[in-house]
Amino acid sequence: MSEKLIVTLIQSLPGILWALLAFAIFAFFYKPVRYELLPKIGALRLMGFELSFRQMRAVSRAISLAEKSEKWGVDISETDKERVLARIKRHGDVLRDARVLWIDDAPENCRNERKMFHEMQMMVDLALSGHDAFRQLEWNEYDLIISDIARDDDNTAGLKFLQEYQKKYETVLPVIFYIGVYQPEKGIPPYAFGVTNRPDELVHLTLDALERKRYG
């Protein structure tokens, strides 16, 4: 073997060693990466896509069923539908893990809206009366209250609850009234965060309230 060839081999030795080291590392980590890490990453991406699809479907279903109710008189334009769906895509993380106290003596009327929030990974506790609501407020921490107004034979039950709530607590949560028949000319009840009978507006109001609480 010539002296020149030996020098060339010696000069190439570091590169060869680095190549062998890289191969050894690849061989060592190939199976964990291929069979453990990559499937988990793929599952997370798939889960995110599936969750986003379920959220969009839940919102669309709530809107569709609200529009079908002749009593409610809800008519939501395609632009408004696209707007609320786009906002959920951008800011849906604000809803995640938020806890809501929902007051309604006829929970079947808001079943789809509650399901809509569940799909957004929100926690929704149901109270059938103001008394039940105060009991739950004593035991649990909430980010928001959603309430009806007419309850049993009292058309102002929700308003009375809000007044009592304001007097009882120094720090109060945002209260959104979600009702069957909305009359805009009556305006927003005093101390309420908002009032609506539209699922898309309910989502907007909820996001507004939670964003204000999170970001000040």
Image: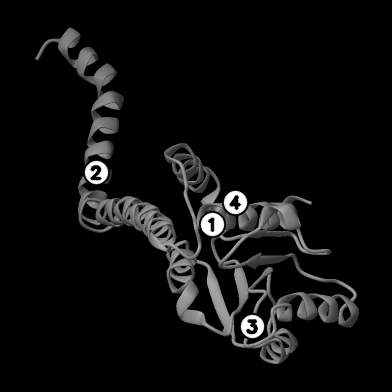
Q: What distance separates the C-alpha of mark 3 from that of mark 4?
A: 24 Å
Looking at marks 3 and 4 on the same chain, the residue that comes earlier in the sequence is marked by 3
Task: Tell me the kind of residue under disc 4.
Answer: His
Instruction: Indicate the position of residue 189 as horizontal and vertical percent values.
Output: 78, 63
Mark 3, Cα crowd under 10 Å, few <14 / some 14-19 / many 20+, is some
Instruction: Indicate the position of residue 129 as horizontal and vertical percent values.
Output: 65, 88
Task: Tell me the kind of residue under disc 3.
Answer: Arg
| Residue 26, label in figure | 2
Q: What distance separates the C-alpha of mark 4 from that of mark 1?
A: 10 Å
Mark 2, Cα crowd under 10 Å, few <14 / some 14-19 / many 20+, is few
CB atoms at circles 3 and 2 under 8 Å apart?
no
Looking at marks 3 and 2 on the same chain, the residue that comes earlier in the sequence is marked by 2
* Rendered residue at 30%/57% (across/down): 40
* Rendered residue at 74%/87% (across/down): 134
Task: Tell me the kind of residue under disc 1.
Answer: Arg
Q: What distance separates the C-alpha of mark 4 from that of mark 2?
A: 49 Å
* Rendered residue at 82%/71% (across/down): 172
Secondary structure of the residue carrying tag 2 is helix
CB atoms at circles 2 and 1 under 8 Å apart?
no
Q: Which quarter of the figure is the N terminus placed in?
A: top left
Mark 4, Cα crowd under 10 Å, few <14 / some 14-19 / many 20+, is some
138 sits left or right of 82 in the view? right
Q: What distance separates the C-alpha of mark 2 from that of mark 1?
A: 56 Å
Instruction: Indicate the position of residue 167 as horizontal and vertical percent values.
Output: 90, 79
Task: Tell me the kind of residue under disc 2.
Answer: Phe
| Residue 198, label in figure | 1
Please, which residue is most extreme toward the top here? Answer: 4
The relative height of residue 32 versus residue 142 in the rendered view (above or below) is above
| Residue 204, label in figure | 4
Please tell me whether mark 2 or mark 1 is closer to you in this view: 1
